[in-house]
Image (cartoon, helix red, strand yellow):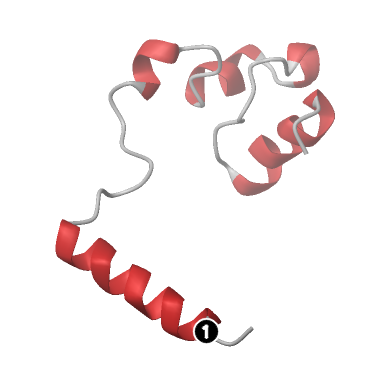
Amino acid sequence: MLNPENQADVVKSQGVSPAVVSVGDLLNAKEKAMFHVGDNEYFKTVALWRVMSPETEKAFNEMWETATKGR
């Protein structure tokens, strides 16, 4: 999934930034700019995942333990 061809396909089909910068010429300049390819400073400013409160994290951990108990 991380090879340049698959990552370029992710950009084009799903409209999200690639996970790797090695997409080479598979994306045009406009796509690279739009999805901040290689712009590490940009990705320092966005939160891809919301941070959970300690209470929420504890609840999810308890649910996971219950769900996987006895496997």
Q: Residue at x 61, y 30 (%)?
A: 18
Q: Residue at x 39, y 23 (%)?
A: 43
Percent position of residue 20, x then y: 64, 23
In front of the other: 15 or 50: 50
Disc 1, SS? loop
Q: In the picture, residue 17 is in which quadrant?
A: top right
Q: Residue at x 17, y 57 (%)?
A: 53
37 lies left or right of 2: left
Q: Residue at x 51, y 26 (%)?
A: 35
Which quadrant: the N terminus? top right
Q: Is residue 50 above or below residue 65?
A: above
Check disc 1: other Cα within 10 Å, few if <14, some if 14-19, many if 20+: few
In front of the other: 54 or 5: 54
Q: Is residue 12 above or below residue 27?
A: below
Q: Extreme front residue here? A: 70
Percent position of residue 15, x then y: 58, 42
Percent position of residue 24, x then y: 76, 12
Q: How many marks?
A: 1
32 lies left or right of 47: right
Which quadrant: the C terminus? bottom right
Q: Amino acid at mark 1?
A: Lys
Q: In the picture, residue 63 is in which quadrant?
A: bottom left
Q: Is residue 5 above or below residue 24?
A: below
62 lies left or right of 18: left
Q: Which residue is mark 1?
A: 69
In front of the other: 24 or 69: 69
